Image (cartoon, rainbow, N blue to C red):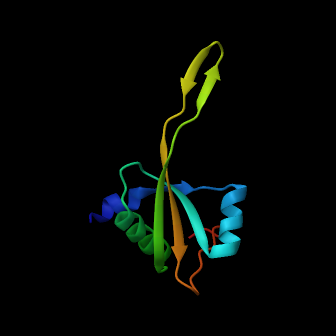
Amino acid sequence: MNKERIMKILQRPHISEKSALIAEKGNQLIFKVIKDANKQEIKAAIELMFQVKVADVRVLRQKGKVKKFGQSMGRRSDWKKAYIRLMPGQEIDMMTPA
């Protein structure tokens, strides 16, 4: 895997009520990733950027919502979401900069 590509895979953490509950319960984080990323690349990106061990990666495609823009209908673009479960004892603090 190309290190340059791995650095571009993670776009941003996905912050929502559901992601906060998942983080509290199961030592998991949710990230928005590029559409063509696979599980191995996502795992390598998390381990490289945050120096933690990843236990499991689950990926899903989130379909874009259909929205009304004035009188015309439009559609937001699709995106990919990754659920990252860390090994026991591992932790990522999202509040402090790296």
- Residue 24: where, in percent of width, then height? 70, 72
Q: Is residue 15 above or below residue 79?
A: below
Location of residue 17 by image quarter = bottom right
- Residue 74: where, in percent of width, then height? 55, 23
Residue 57 horizontal side relative to residue 2, left or right: right
Residue 8 horizontal side relative to residue 27, left or right: left
Residue 63 horizontal side relative to residue 37, left or right: right
- Residue 53: where, in percent of width, then height? 47, 80
Q: Is residue 11 above or below residue 50?
A: above
- Residue 63: where, in percent of width, then height? 51, 41
Location of residue 16 by image quarter = bottom right
Point 69% across, 74% down: residue: 25
Q: Residue furthest bottom?
A: 89
Q: Residue furthest left?
A: 1
Residue 43 horizontal side relative to residue 94, left or right: left
Point 49% across, 36% down: residue: 77
> Number of labelled discs?
0
Q: Quadrant of the C terminus?
A: bottom right
Point 48% across, 40% down: residue: 78
Q: Residue furthest top?
A: 71
Q: Is residue 91 above or below residue 59?
A: below
Q: Is residue 24 above or below residue 69?
A: below
Q: Quadrant of the N terminus?
A: bottom left
